[in-house]
Image: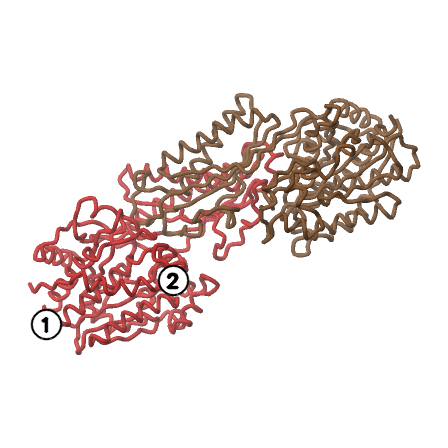
Chain colours: A brown, B red
C-alpha cells in the first residue's frame, strides 16, 4: 500500500483564503453565509479552480454549476471524491468545505507524487448541499443525476427563486425543469467509487478520542411544515380552557411536547430516530398564508407553525414513525379546537448501508497510516448519499464511502463549528491513500 | 328619572364614517389598524371633533393629545364619559370605538334635549389604550394623570418611538418625560364621576341574553418576555435528550404546557386568573439581542422567546401566582440545559371594586329603560381603570362605573369583532340616562 501524507500547511493555506469568502458582517467569528448558487459560493469554487489549474489539474463545470477537477489523462474509470462549499446562514467553514479542501489537497498530493495511475481521479464540488436557504438539500448533486424535482426551482431565498439564483451564477435551470441529468450515462458509469470526507457534526469521535470515523450508513430526513389555525381573541376577557380558547401557540406547545414524548418511547422500543422543530413561527414561511403577523401580546393566537424534521437511516422506520407523529399532531389540534395542515416539503430516504469493501479498505488504510478510527452512522445527510442512490448501466450502484473527522464539541451549523488543520490533514491523508489504492487496481 | 333614548340611526351614521378610517388593506373585513398616535387614530378623533363642534359642543385637546368634548357652560363639577378609538393591528371597530360613539351620541342626545344641567358633561377620547403596538396600555389616560413611566417613550412601533409618534400627531412627550400630568389638580377634582361604555369582549352577555353588563371589577395584567438561550447544533447528528440537546424551542414548549397545567390547578383551587402566550418568536422583539434569526430548519434552536401575560382583578393573587409561574419557568429551563431571562415590562394592578353607588344607579336606569342586565367583572383592562386609580384632593378616588354591551361570540381584537347598532344604542341610552341623572343632582 502506497501511503500519501497531506501536511497541515496545505490545509492552512487554503483556509487562509476561504476564511475571507462569505464571513457574516466580514468577521469569521460571526460564521459564514455562502448560500446555494450565491456569488460567495461561486467565489469559493473559483478559488479551488484557480489552485487546481495552477497545479496542472483539469477543471470544468457541469451544466448545473458543479466544478469537476480531474487529474490529466484519459481513463475509462475514475475514483472520485467531493463535497460542498456552501454554508447555512451563520454556519462554520468546515461543514462541506473541509471535504473540498481535503479532496483538493489529496489530488494535489497524489499528482505531485508522480505516481502512475490506472484510473483517473476526480474532485467534484457540489453546489448547494444545505437546505436552510431554499428548503431543499443536495441541489447540485441531485440535479447532476437528474434527481431534483423541478418544483424546487420556484423556492425562494433572499428575494430570488432558485432558478434565478442559478442563472445569476451561470448554471442552467432548464435541465432541471426538463428532468435531465447533467452527468450523462457514460460519465456516471465511469465512476468506480466515490468518497466524501466530512466533519462528524456530532461528539462521538471527540468523546472516544479517534482521528477518523468510517461511516456505515446515512440518515435520511422527512421535513414538514405544521400549520395551525386557532381563533384570535381577547387575552383578558376569554376564560381559560379549550372550550373557550382555540389558542394556536398553546396547541403547538402541546404538540411539540407530545412529539418529544412519542419519540422517547419509539427510541426506547428500538427505533433510532431524531426529530427537531428548528423554526417556530418564522417571519417568512415559504408559500404560507398563515396570519402570523396578527398575533399580539394581548390576543389569543390565531396562527402558529413550526418546521418538523424526522431523521433516520431506515426509510421505513421514518415513514411508520411519521404516520404515528402526524396522527398525534392531528389529534392534539382537534383536542384544542384548532385546525392543522401538515405539508411535507422534503422526503429524503436514508442510506441504510454504505459500501462494505470501501469501509474495509479505509480501515486498512487507517492502520497503515497509524490513524485511530471507529465506525459510526452519519446523523446528517450528505451528497455522498445522492451518489449511493445512483444505479449504473450494469444494475449496480456506485460504491460510496465516507470519512468523518472530529469537530469541536460536535458543533456544526454554528459560528463555533471547527476542526483543526491537523484533524483535516489526517482525514485528507486517509482520503489520498484510499484513492491511490483504488486508482492502482 | 329623566329617560334619554339614543336611536340606532345616530350610531349607524357615525359608523358609516369610522368604517372608512384605518381598515386593513382598505377593507373593513380585514379588520382595522389605528395604532396609538397614528394618523389614522388622529383622523378618527377629528371626525368626532367635527361632529361635536357642528352640534355646538366645545372641543379641546389636552397636552398629550386626548380630545375633550364638553357641553357649553361653566361648571365646578363634571360628569364624564370616555373611551379610546385606537385598535390593535387587525382588530375590529368596536373595542373602544363603541364607547366613543355611544358617548358622543349620549352628549348629543342630552344637549339636543335642552335639559338644564347642574353639572357639565364631558366626553374624553383617550389616545392609545391598546398595548399591542407600543407594549404599554392606556397611554393617553395614564399620561393625562401623570402616571405613564417615561421609559415608554422609547418603545418602538413601525419604525417610530412613542415619543416620535406623539410629536407627529401634535402631542407633547416632554410632559411625560418630566412626569407631569396633562390634567391639572383643579380639573381632576372637578370630575364628579366617570363612566365608560365598552363591548364585553367575552361571551357572558350573549350567552345569558342580556342587553347590559354592569361591571363590578377590572382585571389587571402583568406582562413579561421569557427569553431562552439554548445551543445551536446540527439537527441530524445530535442525539435526542437534554444531555445532548439544549433546544430552546422545545424548552419553550415544555414551559408553556407546564404553565397551562399550573394555572388549571391554581384556578381549581380558587384563583380567578387567565394567562396567554400571544407572541412566540416574534420577528421584532423590542430591545432583545436574542439570535432568533439564526434558527433554521436543520438546526437545533439556540434561541426562543414568548410574551407571557397573567391577568386578574386582585393584584396580590396575580403576584403570588407569577412567583410560582416564574419559578416553574426557571426550573424547566434548567432541566433542559437552557438559560432563561424573564423581563417584566408591564405590571398594571387591577381594580378589585368599581364604585357601588354608580352600579346601583345604572341598575335603576336599566330598569327604568326596560333593559335586561347582569353584573360581571371585566376581563380586560380599560381606561376607566386609570380613572379609578386617581385620588382627588380630598383623599377620595374618582367614582367610576362601566357599562358592557354584548359583542358577537365574545370576539374582540379580531376582524370578526362586532356589536349591532341596536346593542350600542341601548348602551348609549343607559349611558345618557345615567349621566343626566348624575348631572341633575
Question: Image quadrant of residue A188?
Answer: top right
Residue drawn at x 13%, y 66% is B438
Residue A267 drawn at (x, y percent): 54, 25
Residue drawn at x 41%, y 37% is B258
Whether marks 1 and 2 lie on the same chain: yes
User: Horizontal placement of B223 versus B78: left or right?
Assistant: right
Q: Which mark is residue B115?
A: 1
Which one is in front, A133 or B141?
A133
- Secondary structure under tag 1 reads loop
- Identify the mark nearer the N-term, 1 or 2: 2
Q: Which mark is residue B392?
A: none
What distance separates the C-alpha of mark 1 from that of mark 2? 37 Å
Q: Quadrant of the N terminus of chain B?
A: bottom left
User: Horizontal placement of A427 versus B54: left or right?
Assistant: right
Residue A59 drawn at (x, y percent): 82, 44
Q: Which residue is mark 2?
A: B35
Residue density around tag 2, few if under 14, some if 14–19, many if 20 or more, within 10 Å: many
Marks 1 and 2 in Cβ contact (< 8 Å): no
- Please say whether residue B347 is visible from this viewpoint: no
Which chain hosts label 1?
B
User: Horizontal placement of B210 versus B389: left or right?
Assistant: left
- Please say whether residue B434 is visible from this viewpoint: yes
Question: Image quadrant of residue B173?
Answer: bottom left
Above or below, B170 against A41 in this view is: below
Residue density around tag 1, few if under 14, some if 14–19, many if 20 or more, within 10 Å: few
- Secondary structure under tag 2 reads loop
Question: Image quadrant of residue A412?
Answer: top right
Above or below, A91 against B20 in this view is: above
Which one is in front, B10 or A427?
B10
Residue A182 drawn at (x, y percent): 72, 39
Which chain hosts label 2?
B
Amino acid at each position: 500500500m502506497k501511503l500519501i501524507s497531506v501536511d497541515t500547511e496545505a490545509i492552512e493555506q487554503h483556509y487562509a483564503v476561504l476564511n475571507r469568502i462569505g464571513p457574516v458582517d466580514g468577521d469569521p467569528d460571526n460564521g459564514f453565509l455562502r448560500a446555494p448558487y450565491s456569488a460567495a459560493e461561486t467565489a469559493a469554487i473559483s478559488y479551488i479552480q484557480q489552485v487546481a489549474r495552477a497545479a496542472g489539474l483539469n477543471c470544468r463545470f457541469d451544466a448545473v454549476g458543479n466544478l469537476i477537477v480531474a487529474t490529466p489523462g484519459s481513463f475509462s474509470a475514475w475514483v472520485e471524491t467531493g463535497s460542498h462549499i456552501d454554508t447555512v446562514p451563520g454556519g462554520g467553514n468546515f461543514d462541506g468545505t473541509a471535504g473540498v479542501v481535503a479532496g483538493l489537497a489529496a489530488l494535489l498530493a497524489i499528482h505531485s507524487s508522480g505516481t502512475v495511475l490506472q484510473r483517473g481521479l476526480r474532485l467534484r464540488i457540489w453546489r448547494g448541499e444545505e437546505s436552510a436557504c431554499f428548503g431543499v438539500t443536495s441541489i447540485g448533486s441531485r440535479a447532476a443525476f437528474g434527481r431534483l424535482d423541478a418544483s424546487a426551482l420556484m423556492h425562494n431565498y433572499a428575494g430570488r427563486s432558485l432558478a434565478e439564483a442559478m442563472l445569476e451564477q451561470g448554471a442552467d435551470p432548464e435541465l432541471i425543469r426538463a428532468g435531465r441529468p447533467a452527468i450523462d450515462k457514460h460519465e456516471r458509469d465511469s465512476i468506480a467509487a466515490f468518497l466524501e470526507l466530512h466533519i462528524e457534526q456530532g461528539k462521538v469521535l471527540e468523546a472516544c478520542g479517534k482521528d477518523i470515523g468510517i461511516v456505515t450508513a446515512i440518515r435520511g430526513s422527512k421535513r414538514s411544515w405544521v400549520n395551525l389555525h386557532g381563533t384570535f381573541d381577547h387575552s383578558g376577557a376569554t376564560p381559560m380552557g379549550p372550550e373557550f380558547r382555540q389558542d394556536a401557540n398553546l396547541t403547538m406547545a402541546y404538540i411539540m411536547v407530545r412529539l418529544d414524548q412519542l419519540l422517547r418511547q419509539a427510541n426506547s422500543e428500538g427505533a433510532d430516530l431524531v426529530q427537531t422543530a428548528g423554526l417556530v413561527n418564522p417571519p417568512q414561511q415559504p408559500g404560507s398564508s398563515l396570519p402570523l403577523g396578527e398575533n399580539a401580546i394581548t390576543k389569543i393566537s390565531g396562527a402558529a407553525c413550526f418546521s418538523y424534521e424526522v431523521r433516520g437511516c431506515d426509510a421505513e422506520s421514518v415513514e411508520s414513525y411519521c404516520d404515528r407523529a402526524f396522527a398525534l399532531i392531528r389529534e392534539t389540534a382537534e383536542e384544542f379546537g384548532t385546525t392543522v395542515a401538515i405539508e411535507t416539503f422534503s422526503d429524503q430516504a436514508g442510506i441504510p448501508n454504505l459500501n462494505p469493501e470501501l469501509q474495509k479498505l479505509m480501515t486498512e488504510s487507517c492502520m497503515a497510516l497509524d490513524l485511530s478510527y471507529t465506525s459510526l452512522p452519519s446523523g446528517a445527510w450528505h451528497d455522498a448519499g445522492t451518489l449511493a442512490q445512483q444505479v449504473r448501466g450494469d444494475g449496480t450502484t456506485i460504491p460510496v464511502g465516507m470519512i468523518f473527522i472530529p469537530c469541536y464539541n460536535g458543533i456544526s451549523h454554528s459560528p463555533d463549528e471547527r476542526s483543526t488543520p491537523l484533524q483535516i490533514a489526517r482525514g485528507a491523508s486517509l482520503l489520498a491513500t484510499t484513492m491511490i489504492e483504488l486508482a492502482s487496481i
